[in-house]
Amino acid sequence: MRASVVGCRMSLGTLINGLLVSVVAALLWKYSNLSEHAALLEEELHMTRQSQELSQARIDYHVALQALQEHGTRMVCTGKMHTDRICRFDYLCYSSEAEEFVFFHSNFSVMLPNLGSRRFQPALLDLSSVEDHNTQYFNFLELPAAALKFMPKPVFVPDVTLILNRFNPDNLMHVFHDDLLPAFYTMNQYSDLDDEARLVFMEGWAEGPHFDLYRLLSSKQPLLKEQLRNFGKLMCFTKSYIGLSKMTTWYQYGFVQPQGPKANILVSGNEIRQFSRALMEKMNITRGEEAEKDGGSAEDEKVKEKKDDYIVLFSRSTTRLILNEAELIMALAQEFQMRVVTVSLEEQSFPSIVQTISCASVLVSMHGAQLITSLFLPRGAAVVELFPFAVNPEQYTPYKTLASLPGMDLHYISWRNTKEENTITHPDRPWEQGGIAHLEKEEQERILTNKEVPRHLCCRNPEWLFRIYQDTLVDIPSFLEVLKEGMKTKPSLKKAKPSTTVYPGRVREPQCQTSVQTTNDAKLTVSWQIPWNLKYLKVKEVKYEVWIQEQGENTYMPFILPQQNYTFSENIKPFTTYLVWVRCIFNKNLLGPFADVLMCKT
């Protein structure tokens, strides 16, 4: 009996111990799962916080992750070639580890255009407005969406982003021409690239001296490539645009042929001035120009205008100096009876320089990137560009081209130093500042004896660098002579009114009538009504162009007519079908579109 009781007690103890072990094991397993779940929650919360550090917008991390896993990346592009293509992506990702963009494929992914291997010939698109430059090409890697389970947890960027390359953010000309203007009009092209969009720069440069200018395009802080590492190993942009419009660029830098204006310039001064006004508003700058007055005599207006006119001279402090700057300032003031104001990129804020230039009558400067600020000049102002010895002004024309754009209404004048004794060279400087001491003696002597830099390709031509970084003693008499002669062709220092070009519309109600006179003779009468917009315009001269083509033939007969109907009989055959096109011409060279083709049977 006692033995059985003891046996029962032992069994009960064993059972209790077993139960305790099971309970402890269950608690440990539950704690382990809770800890793992908590760690996952903490990691996802961390990812969400990282996303929200980029924006005030909230993003549901689980919804974003599910969308990426199920729907993958989506891409729709505009443009036929990589040189004019801009693409919109949903959930395009960037691996900071591989330094590559990643397109995740699922059954619901979209890729338009689906170019296959042609995407690499040479690229999907250009990241910069400087086209077909192999350091600016954009492509992406491809992975199945299932690969996400093996990759670092993505960080989602909720902002709409514009992803691009800055071409040369240390140079003010490149900042405006290659980056700011194209980005401004790319953002104007897409409604969701608004003031809340974020710019992402992928070229790898640091901020640079002009980073504040990029900040004017958006209320969000731009991101640099190097900063993307701080947000995680895999960064996914919920909505992004990649590429820049090239429609606003007017100059090519000589990668294939010597530098000069683009062959097909699509921008006018009106678009440039819209951009400059927008930037001035962002910088809280208003022009000092007065609105046109209804009262006051013409004499009063002339006195007021003369009093307010002044000349701006760009002063440089390190390279490309004007050695007799003070003498030049006095000569300008005496000759034109105007104040002369100096500005300096090294010593003044950029907004203060723009404020000064925006009301100037004349801007004078040595050739250099600072002359891009001429896009802030008022209409009717003059741009005077000085060139060092041996540098031909006709071969380096970015600012002449800008000033000459229709609608810029700027008057351009160039002066070059033709006296070698009035130049100071710096052969011992580093090569990037024009030094030539590193070259062979024969090459140095050739450069020193040459009187003009020959045409050359971009970008490190030592003779060009040597000459453009010279300091110059401006020959005052020759400079004033060139300036006075140039001013003779300038319409007026008075600010000109904005100019616009209006083209004719289609002619309306075109029709034809035919008649057969004999078996060999026929007549074709064509008539039409004036374009709809003509009745609202004051046009000096209106004519009409008519093309007549026998059906099946390759050639046509063109006619320029002053009236709205005309009967053609010469070379008109009986029982023949003729195709007829009609369009309007304003002021000799403004051509309207053709009306729909007429089919006329005699």
Image (tube, helix red, strand yellow):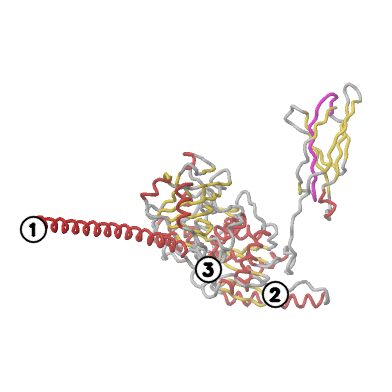
Tell me the tag on residue 212. Answer: 3
Percent x, y for residue 55?
Answer: 50, 64
Q: Which secondary structure class fits the magenta region best?
A: strand
Foreground tag (3 vs 1) = 1
Instruction: Left or right? Give the position of 63 relative to 196.
Output: left
Q: Which is more toward the observer, 581 or 412?
A: 581
Tally of numbered tags: 3
Percent x, y for residue 170?
Answer: 49, 64
Mark 3 Cα shell of 10 Å, populated few (<14), some (14-19), many (≥20)? few
| Location of the N terminus (image quadrant) | bottom left
Q: Which is more toward the observer, 193 or 380?
A: 193
Of pointers 2 and 1, the one earlier in the residue sequence:
1
Foreground tag (2 vs 1) = 1
Vertical relation: 408 (above or below) 340: above
Q: Amino acid at mark 2?
A: Asp
Residue furthest to the right in view is 517
Percent x, y for residue 133?
Answer: 49, 50
Mark 1 Cα shell of 10 Å, populated few (<14), some (14-19), many (≥20)? few
Segment colored magenta: 572-587
Q: Give the residue number, with chain letter if any, for mark 1.
A: 2
The residues bearing labels 3 and 2 have C-alpha atoms spaced at a distance of 30 Å
Q: Give the residue number, with chain letter if any, for mark 2.
A: 309
Q: Amino acid at mark 3?
A: Asp
